[in-house]
Image (cartoon, grey):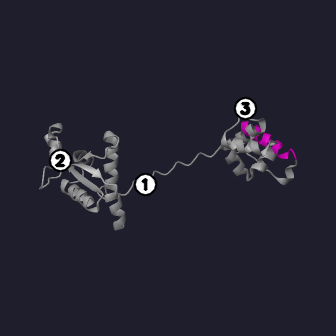
Amino acid sequence: MGKAQQTTSSPLAPLELLRTIRRLDRERDGGRNYLPIYLLREALMEIPREQLDRALTAMVALGWLRMSTIQETRTVTPEQLAAGIPSAVSGPRFYLVVMPEAPAEPEPPAEPEPRSVVRQLRLDLGLTQAGLAELLGCRKLSILRWEKELPSPQPLLLRAALEAHARGCLPQPSPADGPWGWHARLFAALAEARD
C-alpha cells in the first residue's frame, strides 16, 4: 500500500479530519461552525491527544481552521475545558472554526434516476421510440409519455410486453414476423411462462 493511500484513509489526514469536524458540527447544532474540541476528542478517542493536537495545529497553519477560546467557562464542565488545547497567551483554545479557505466538501454523487420500465423495455428490444410505437400499435408521443409515467390503465399490448419483460420471456421482433407475428409470439411466450 502506498504512502498516499495510507494518509487519505487515516482519521488524521487533513481532509478526513476536516470532514469529521464538519459532520460533528452539523450533528451538534445544525452547523454553527463553532465545534467544541472535546466533542472531536470524544469522536476520535482512539487518537492520542498529542497526535490530534498536532493535526489540528497543522490545519490552523494551512489556514483551514481557527481555534477560539471560551468566554463563559461556567457553561462547561472542568473535563470539557481541560479537553481544549492549552495556549500561552490566554485560556485554552476550546472551539474549532472552519475557515472559508478550507476545501469544500465534495457534493455527494447524485443518485441515478431510475430508468422507466417502458424505456428499459424499448432498449432491451433494440428499438427507437417510433419503432416501439409501431410494434405496440400506438403513437410515438404515447411512448414518450409512457417513458416518463406509466398510463393507468395500461393498454393490453403494453401490459403484456411489460409482463413478458419482467418474466424474462420477451421475444425479440423479427422482420419475418409480419404485422401480427410478434404479438402472437408475445402471447405464446406469456402463456408458456404462466404455466
Rendered position, 3 above or below 127:
below
The magenta region covers 179-194
Mark 1 highlights which residue? 106
Front position in the image: 133 or 167: 133
Rendered position, 110 above or below 146:
below
Q: Picture quarter containing residue 61?
A: bottom left
Task: Assess whether residue 180 is covered by the magenta stretch.
Answer: yes
Mark 2 highlights which residue? 83
Question: Is label 1 in a helix, a strand or a loop?
Answer: loop
> x, y (%) of residue 32?
31, 43
> x, y (%) of residue 40?
26, 48
Q: Residues within 10 Å of mark 2 (few under 14, many from 20)?
A: some
**Given contact means CB atoms under 8 Å apart, are the residues at marks 3 and 1 in contact?**
no
Mark 3 highlights which residue? 153
Amino acid type assigned to the residue bearing label 2 in the image: Ala
30 relative position to 164: left or right? left
94 relative position to 141: left or right? left
